[in-house]
């Protein structure tokens, strides 16, 4: 999870409020100190921390809770609102025709991030082209080409050409008629005049609507000066912070960039091409505090779900039928949404309750179940009652597992089947679930 250490510390502070019999000055001051400590350990600027916690304390002690809200809920809401303020306002990159210029120093993850952004816009219905305009790093074109193949997005470049401007101009002709063209430019070890000059020339040649700075979150508070320098030089329209999942300094980078006035568009939360999240301060802080992010969960589900297959499974469930094949389809959709640890962080109050070893064990178990079901016949998947002792032995041999693993799967299936049957007999629960689906669908459309 992003900024897991900071999130845990903040959740512990929130629990003090939630578990208190009443809110008084002593509790507020204690919680403020806990939040100060948590933010400073996450490398957030001292001045910013003191200013934020001063506002928090003043509001918590002077503001009266709105009608229908308890004093505990009111203070938790104040903590949430003040944290949202320090990470700044986002800059959305809309799914519309545009040219995007990726800029940044060497080694910040610019090329990979260009691919991640192309994937995101491609998934949102845009016809996207990638341009390898980094003429200084020998492997840049090959790297971008490999990424393009993985995400089914064409890449234009010329490893022999030494002028980024000429490559950019040729790319405009090559990708004529495309919705979005993303230009991956050269970087340097420092912000040097020749780098700024090259970026300005390319920007002028392509007339980019969006100029996005890619910054490694490990730079911490130093992300601020870097963002400001690029912002002053080329007029950034957004910032993408990479490696937010693997550093304690992410809080510093996030708040430092926000201070410069260069808005954050995305955060990189892993090495895979799907590990790029559109930055939404409300949703980001909500997850950090363990309040979940149902909208992101719905978005992830919609990315991997085959709508016809999902509807078919739902119809079978509603009719009381549930086979191993249905269970297999559900597991495939779940695993396609990413690691369980990430999914748990999107559910309110769940991310910090499940230990890492429990998550890993469950993930391994699901994968083993899938391998076992791959060794079953179509007839067995449709009618699990056929699977007796001799079939159990055959399936175990075919899947490279033990007979007890096959029986464990059958036991899990039987529990799921009974749960579905029990659900179908509970009219009240069925109505509640239908309402949840409806509400979730409305939320997804509003998101």
Image (cartoon, rainbow, N blue to C red):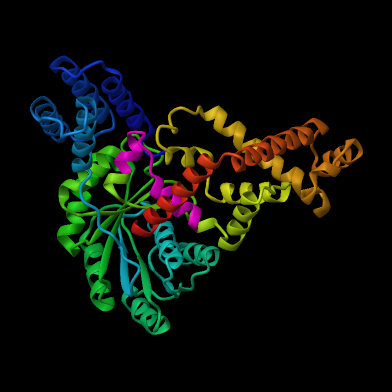
* Place of residue 167 in the rendered image (x, y in percent of width and height, measured from the top left): 37, 77
Determine if the magenta segment contains residue 217: no
Specify the quadrant of the image occupied by residue 359: top right
Horizontal relation, residue 34 to residue 379: left or right:
left
- The stretch of residues the image draws in magenta is 284-302
Q: Is residue 42 above or below residue 37?
A: below
Nearer to us in this view, 137 or 63? 63
- Residue at the spot 70% in from the left edge and 45% down from the top edge: 370
Count of numbered tags: 0
Tell me which residue sits at (50%, 65%) in the image: 142
Q: Is residue 272 left or right of residue 194?
A: right
Residue 244 lies, with reference to residue 69, above or below; the image says: below
Residue 230, position as x, y percentages in the image = 21, 57
In depth, the one of 358 and 3 nearer the eye is 358
Q: Quadrant of the C terminus?
A: bottom left
Residue beneath the point at 18% across and 58% down: 231
**What is the x, y in percent for residue 313?**
63, 54
């Amino acid at each position: 999870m992003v900024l897991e250490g900071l999130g845990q510390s903040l959740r512990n502070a929130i629990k003090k409020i939630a578990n208190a019999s009443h809110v008084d000055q002593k509790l507020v001051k204690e919680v403020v100190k806990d939040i100060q400590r948590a933010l400073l350990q996450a490398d957030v600027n001292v001045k910013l921390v003191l200013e934020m916690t001063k506002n928090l304390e003043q509001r918590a002690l002077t503001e009266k809770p709105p009608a229908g809200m308890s004093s505990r809920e009111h203070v938790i809401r104040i903590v949430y609102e003040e944290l949202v303020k320090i990470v700044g306002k986002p800059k959305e990159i809309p799914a519309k025709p545009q040219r995007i210029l990726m800029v940044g120093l060497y080694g910040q993850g610019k090329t990979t991030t260009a691919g991640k952004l192309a994937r995101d816009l491609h998934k949102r219905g845009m016809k996207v082209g990638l341009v390898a305009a980094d003429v200084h790093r020998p492997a840049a074109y090959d790297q971008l080409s490999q990424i393009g193949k993985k995400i089914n997005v064409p890449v234009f470049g010329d490893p022999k050409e030494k002028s980024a401007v000429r490559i950019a101009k040729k790319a405009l002709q090559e990708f004529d008629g495309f919705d979005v063209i993303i230009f991956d430019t050269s970087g340097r070890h420092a912000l040097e005049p020749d780098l700024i000059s090259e970026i300005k020339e390319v920007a002028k040649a392509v007339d980019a609507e969006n100029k996005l700075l890619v910054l490694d979150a490990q730079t911490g508070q130093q992300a601020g000066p870097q963002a400001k320098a690029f912002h002053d030089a080329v007029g950034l329209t957004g910032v993408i912070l990479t490696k937010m999942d693997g550093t304690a300094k992410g809080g510093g980078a996030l708040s430092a960039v926000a201070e410069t006035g260069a808005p954050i568009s995305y955060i990189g939360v892993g090495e895979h091409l799907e590990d790029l999240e559109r930055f939404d301060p409300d949703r980001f802080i909500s997850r950090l505090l363990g309040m979940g992010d149902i909208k992101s969960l719905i978005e992830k589900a919609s990315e991997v779900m085959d709508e016809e297959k999902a509807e078919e499974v739902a119809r079978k469930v509603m009719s009381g039928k549930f086979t191993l094949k249905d269970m297999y389809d559900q597991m495939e959709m779940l695993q396609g949404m990413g690691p369980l640890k990430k999914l748990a962080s999107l559910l309110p109050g769940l991310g910090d309750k499940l230990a890492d070893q429990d998550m890993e064990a469950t993930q391994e178990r699901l994968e083993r179940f899938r391998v076992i079901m791959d060794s079953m016949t179509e007839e067995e998947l449709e009618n699990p009652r056929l699977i007796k002792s001799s079939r159990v032995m055959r399936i175990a041999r075919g899947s490279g597992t033990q007979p007890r693993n096959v029986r464990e799967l059958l036991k899990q299936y039987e529990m799921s089947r009974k749960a579905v049957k029990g659900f179908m007999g509970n009219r009240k629960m069925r109505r509640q679930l239908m309402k949840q689906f409806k509400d979730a669908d409305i939320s997804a459309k509003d998101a």
